[in-house]
Amino acid sequence: ISHIPGTIIQGRFDMICPPDAAYRLSEAWGNADLRMIPLAGHALSEPRITAELVSVMDRLRQVY
């Protein structure tokens, strides 16, 4: 999948999926944009995670 662009949104304090896993994935992927969200954990319901997801989707909507 290295040729497919993607965005990884990761909460800095995620205890379910540790941030180092997201970092390793982004390094191996090569075409991924890692967005580390400070003061956020795992849940979609966290305001900073939700805001970043909306931002990425808005950007994709403009591109495609």
Image (cartoon, rainbow, N blue to C red):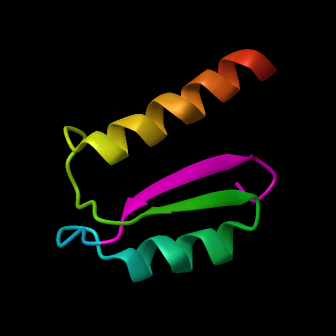
Q: Give the x, y percent position of residue 8.
A: 52, 55
Q: Give the x, y percent position of residue 46.
A: 22, 44
* Residue at x 70% of width, y 54% of height: 1
Of 41 and 3, nearer the camera is 41
Query: Does residue 27 appear in the picture of this structure?
Result: yes
Residue 63, placed above or below residue 1? above
Query: Does residue 64 appear in the picture of this structure?
Result: no
* Residue at x 80% of width, y 22% of height: 63
Of 26 and 44, nearer the camera is 44
* Residue at x 18% of width, y 68% of height: 16
Count the marks: how many? 0
Q: Quadrant where the C terminus lies?
A: top right
Chain part drawn in magenta: 1-12
Residue 47, placed above or below residue 15? above
Q: Give the x, y percent position of residue 62.
A: 75, 17
For residue 38, what is the image quadrant? bottom left
* Residue 10 among those drawn in magenta: yes
Q: Give the x, y percent position of residue 28.
A: 66, 75
Q: Is residue 61 left or right of residue 39?
A: right
Residue 42, placed above or below residue 63? below
Q: Is residue 2 left or right of residue 47?
A: right
Of 35 and 28, nearer the camera is 35
